[in-house]
Image (cartoon, rainbow, N blue to C red):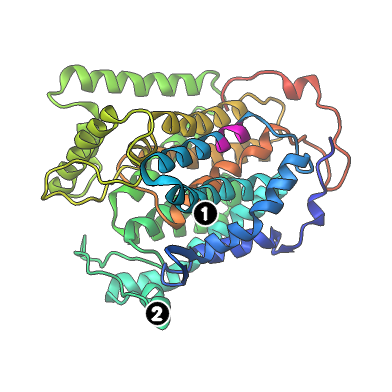
Amino acid sequence: MPVAAASSTRRVFGVPVVIAIFFLAMMLPTAASVNLGGLRLSAYRVVLIVMFVPMLVQLVSGRKGRMHVFDLLVFAHCGWAMLALIKWGGLAQGIESGGIYVVEFAGAYLLARIYVRSYEDFAAVARAYVGLVVATLLFTVPEALTGIHILHDGISGALGGPMAPFIEPRMGLERTFGPFDHPILYGVFSASAFSLAYFVVAERRLMNLRGMARVAGVGLATFMSASGGPYVVLIMQGFVAAWERVLGRVKGRWAALFTLFGLIYLAIDLFSTRTPFHVFVNYFTFSRQSAYNRILIFEYGTAEVARHPVFGIGLGDWERPSWMSDSMDNFWLVVAVRYGIPAFLLLLGLLLGLVWAVGQRRGLPPEWRRARHAWAFTLFGITVAAATVHLWNALFVLFLFLIGAGAWLLDAQPGRARGAPRPAPSARALRPARLF
């Protein structure tokens, strides 16, 4: 079935208007919300609520490409999460909290799935995202030097919201919030743009000075957060980008990389007195206290999963010592604790399955391969860091948006101009290939 012409979508600087509005809505502090009963409607939630049904209709109708198994995984995960909330909180909580979870999870995924349908769309979104990160430096560099939280306190204060809480400086710098609720959120937001900047904006060319300046800007913005989790996102992307650049013509380089990771894990497990998770947390956090707290979170959190493996505990409190905070700095663990192992596996299947399926396509133009690297490496960095960081509010919907932003690579055909009829796929385009 033909895909609707991308040119029919209204655009701002090449980006679909709805995505531009979504990006700007993510940049507003939590104070820019409307409380409707017990429900908080932040700006980005309003965007997703308004667009949810129209996007769902476009998906089901096939006007934006055929539905595939990964779309079904999204709705299966949301359905299981809602069942868990109904089981532990009753029908009212399931509809209210579960409903907004569906809007955030499926809505953010659909926004990218529906409106990013070509390389041109993906490149425009990458340029807009990177440009937004670099633009925040106008506020966060002074913030790091003065301790005045310009964006967060300026917008939140004007709306009568709370000021940024005090957080201990690191490396002689104030930790920057940008417009977000915590420096770690601003850091992950910034670091997630690295691969997009390097592979798409700079086109992987070191002599592209304007592009590489944006890559450096993304790195500087991440540094301003002074948070270990965002640094992990940046380091992981940089590592796999360097691996690809050095071994770009070597067959089996990705299998070799995964084998290397496996050997490192096995070596740590065999020769260290600590588990690989303990080693990872200790070396990728700034303080021993922070590392120790994350280890305790993992131990008590996995024990909670073992007690409630099917439907989790919903929004209930998890068992832990009385002196421990209820904050759980592990996104993957939060999903399993709240909604059970099936929900966790459905999300993991969506992420890994989509990356694997996209990686099987052959015969793609060079710029499409760069886009594929940018998308997959971004998700890789966030996935690893999410073991020590919880993704909440704007960062949660950004993660789902980024997952959906690579779905166009499943069925888009090279050489097809915008609005042109979709040709039958060639045997070369459909032939299995090695990952990336």
Lateral position of residue 199 relative to residue 365, left or right: left
Which of the marked residues, 2 or 1, is nearer the chain's N terminus?
2
Identify the residue shown where x is 22% and y is 31%: 303
Nearest to the eye among marks 2 and 1: give it: 2
Count of marks, rendered view: 2
Judging depth in this view, the residue of 422 and 56 nearest the camera is 56
- Looking at the picture, how far across and down is residue 121, in whole percent? 69, 50
**Rendered location of residue 194, percent (x, y):** 48, 49
How packed mark 2 is, by other alpha carbons closer than 10 Å (few <14, some 14-19, many 20 or more), is some
Mark 2 lies on residue: 154
Q: Can residue 193 be seen in this view?
A: no
Characterize the magenta stretch by its predominant secondary structure: helix
**Amino acid type at image mark 1:** Met
Residue found at x 43% / y 77%: 155
Name of the residue lying farthest toward the bottom:
158
Q: Can residue 152 be seen in this view?
A: yes
Q: For the N terminus, which image quadrant? A: top right
Residue furthest to the front in view is: 91
Q: As rendered, which of 165 and 102 lies closer to the eye?
A: 102
Per the rendered image, the range of residues in magenta is 70-75
Left or right side of 48 for 416? right
Q: Is residue 407 inside the magenta stretch?
A: no
- Residue holding disc 1: 212
| Three-letter code, disc 2 | Gly
Label 1 residue SS: helix
SS at badge 2: helix
Relative vertical location of residue 111 with respect to residue 367 in this rendering, above or below: below
Q: Which residue is drawn at 77% across and 39% down?
A: 62
